[in-house]
Structures are given as structure tokens and as C-alpha cells.
Amino acid sequence: MSRIALITGASSGIGKATAQAFAKSGIDLILCGRRKDRLRDLSEEFHHIKTTLLDFDVRDRKDTFKAIESLGSDWQNIDILVNNAGNAHGFDPVDAGDPDDWDAMLDSNVKGLLYVSKAVIPGMVRRGRGHIVNLSSIAGKETYANGTVYCASKAAVEALSAGMRLDLTQHGIKVTNIAPGAVETEFSMVRFKGDEARADKVYAGFDPLRAEDIADSILYAINAPPHVTIADITILAAAQAAATTVYRKG
Ligand code: 8X3
């Protein structure tokens, strides 16, 4: 029987690559994001699986519940939830940080992840099975200068993954925490508010991770045998020794 996965932030980056990897494995997809046109373009790539689209912003609690509750009966038995939506906004010391940036990060990376989970988990508990994959970051394990609030939001994801595992294992639900290092996606363009030169500099002089590398590890975790939980995966670029220790050439 085919599985159903709900992926947030599916319109680009790691979410999109995960959707593509899942589709290749024959997993039916609930693609969630804010940009419906991009979700539609992505779903048109897939011919041999079923897809449905939900466009909502995880930061909006009401919209999040409304969207997930609107799923038809064919889509309600979600086997896999990939909590991928989230971003970094701004790169400043905490005394100079913009509270709007803090709200954006905490509202999506922490509260949005909780809203989506709250909408999906009760069904998993009823069915006695499910798999939740939370996208954390190396930033959740190491705090770096100018990234205080982003790092705090990802440290919260680490705690949520551990806590979900404590609360949900008894219901047959697996929880996997994925902590990527430097992945070249729209991430830095969003962090630096469209400053392309600054964003490019983040990935200059070394070979960064691609979204597909992270999708591979998610696929590995969700395809582990029933008696195995892949609890935590940290993935760094080969030139990256720690969050901000990157060996660059030139
Ligand atoms: C993204 C990784 O190290 O650029 O979550 O913050 S990092």
C-alpha cells in the first residue's frame, strides 16, 4: 500500500527535493507552501503518484488547522510528516536585531512546526503509527554570532524532536531530527533579504550541500525497517567542520 506524506515548505529547497525523492519512491504527496503556483508546477512533474496542494502559511494558526482539516478522506491517513517550513531572517548581533525578524523566525520555525504537528499527530496516534521528520539545523546544536535567534529557534526544534519522541514513541510514531549544515538553497537570500552578493559569499570557495543531499537522508530515515528509528542525523558539507568553520579555497 502506498504511503502518504505531508511536506511543509515544499515549493523550494529541501522541501521540494524531498517531494521529488519521495515521489520517486512512490509516496503520495500533500504539498504545502505559501506559493501555490510553485506547488502546482512541482506537482505537474509527478505522474505516477497522487498529489494534492495546500497553500497556507504555517505562521497562521487558524489557516494551518483549516487547511489540514480540509483534506478529503483519501488524504487523511498521513503516514509521514516532514516539518520543513522555516527560514532565517537577518544576521545581526542580538542588540541590533529586528524584532520583526525574530517574530518571523520563531513564528515559522517553532510555532508553525507545532501547529502543523498538532493538526497531524492526533490521526497518527489514533492509527498507532506515523513518522515525523523535523528539519533542525547545525545551528540548533551550535550557537553562532549574529545568528542568536535563528539558532535559538533551531535549538527549540531539537528540543521538540526529543520531546515528541518521548511523548509519541508509545503510540508507534517515529521521530527523526535532521540537522543540515551549509546547504545552497534560497536560505541565504532570505536571511540577507535578497542581497545576492552576501548570499553568494556564504557558499564561495567550497562545495556546499545540495537540497538533494538532505532529501537522501530523509528518505533513508523514512525507509528504515519497522524496528529502527533514525533519531538524529547531522549532515555537513565535506569542507565544513562546524557551523561556522568552513575550509574555503582561494
Ligand atoms: C542552516 C545552516 O549553519 O547556515 O540552517 O545556519 S547554517
Image: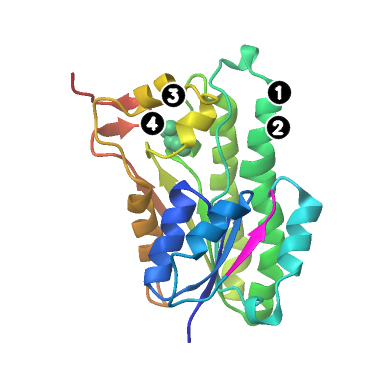
Residue with the mark numbered 3? 196
> Which callout, 3 or 4, points to the residue nearer the camera?
3
Furthest-bottom residue in this view: 1
Cα–Cα span, label 4 and label 2 = 23 Å
Residue with the mark numbered 4? 243
* Residue 109 visible (yes or no): yes
State if disc 3 and disc 1 touch (CB < 8 Å). no
Q: What number is the disc on residue 103? A: 2
Front residue (pair 163, 46): 46
User: Picture coordinates of residue 117 (x, y %)?
Assistant: 66, 59
Secondary element type, mark 3 = helix
Cα–Cα span, label 4 and label 1 = 24 Å
Front residue (pair 83, 2): 2
* Vertical arrangement, residue 37 with respect to residue 173, above or below: above
Secondary element type, mark 2 = helix
Upstream in the sequence, badge 1 or badge 3?
Answer: 1
**Would residue 161 be found to the left or right of residue 208 on screen?**
right
Residue with the mark numbered 1? 99
> Which callout, 4 or 1, points to the residue nearer the camera?
1
User: Picture coordinates of residue 11 (x, y %)?
Assistant: 53, 51
The three-letter amino acid code for the residue at tag 3 is Glu
Furthest-left residue in this view: 250
Determine whether the beta carbon of the residue marked 4 sits less than 8 angstroms from the nearest atom of ligand 1: yes
User: Picture coordinates of residue 173 (x, y %)?
Assistant: 56, 70
Q: Are there few (<14), some (14-19), or many (20+) residues within 10 Å of tag 1?
A: few
Residue at 53% across, 21% down = 91
Residue at 28% across, 33% down = 240
**Would residue 156 be found to the left or right of residue 224 on screen?**
right
Furthest-right residue in this view: 62
Ligand 1, image quadrant it occupies? top left
State if disc 2 and disc 1 touch (CB < 8 Å). yes
